[in-house]
Amino acid sequence: MTKSELIERIIDKQDQLSVKDIEFAIKIMLDAMSETLADGDRIEIRGFGSFSLHYRNARTGRNPKTGESVILDGKFVPHFKPGKELRDCVNASIEP
Amino acid sequence: MALTKAELAERLNEEVGLNKREAKDIVELFFNEIRDSLIENQQVKLSGFGNFDLRDKSQRPGRNPKTGEEIPISARRVVTFRPGQKLKVQVENYAGSPDE
């Protein structure tokens, strides 16, 4: 499912808002989520999961083209931990 | 402070002009539709943000850490998140220490 398919599904499930409002609302939500992580804060969505930053230590990498060693600085990467409810219902879907 | 569903609804109220009820509904629908897609074993791709993928893990041997007793960890399906390029670039220059 892509972002536009997600937006379509949300449009189908409610009848009060215009397509334009829903599209804008989803953009605002995703922007707010990205900005929260960029500020080093967590996102906590009950029943769904939480997003936080994990630190990756500096390491020596290699330029794949030249084989030359390069020092890569430490950096933060986004991390998602599914909540119990999401974990349980996704796992339950494996059973026939 | 952590971003929650309540805070997201408030943003929709302020920035999109949805009333409180509509804002809350959209926030709920957003996460419920993502969850339902994952339950249907369909990955979710949110360009600019990231992808929610599914991985099937086969059964593996485990151990009760308290008793040392061997118990198999059953086969399971798990959700993984792969951040998109845009989000990765946005966070990698964060200089502080994350509030774990």
Image: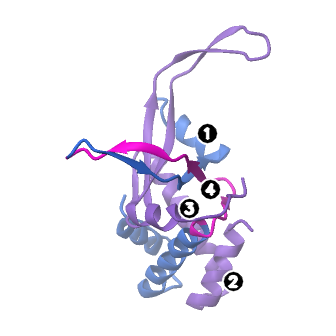
Chain colours: A blue, B purple
Give the alpha-carbon distance from disc 4 to disc 1, as whole Å: 21 Å
- Report the residue at 59% width, 41% height from top: A87
Q: What residue type is labelled 2?
A: Lys
Q: What element carries label 3?
A: helix
Tell me the residue that label 4 is attached to.
A52
Can residue B49 be seen by looking at this rendering? no
- Report the residue at 28% width, 44% height from top: A68
Give the alpha-carbon distance from disc 4 to disc 2, as whole Å: 27 Å
Q: Which amino acid does label 1 sit on?
A: Asp
Q: Which chain carries label 4?
A: A
Seen from the viewer's position, the closer of residues A49 and A93 is A49
Give the alpha-carbon distance from disc 3 to disc 1, as whole Å: 15 Å
Q: What residue type is labelled 3?
A: Phe
Give percent across and percent down for residue A1.
37, 58
Q: Which mark is residue B31?
A: 3
Seen from the viewer's position, the closer of residues B81 and A84 is B81
Picture layout, residue A66 above or below residue A12: above
Tell me the residue that label 1 is attached to.
A88
Q: Mark 3 lies on which chain?
A: B
Give the alpha-carbon distance from disc 2 to disc 3, as whole Å: 17 Å
In the rendered structure, does residue A44 fall within the stretch colored magenta?
A: yes
Give percent across and percent down for residue B100.
72, 52
Q: What element carries label 4?
A: strand
Query: Are the numbered discs 4 and 2 placed on the same chain, yes or no?
Result: no
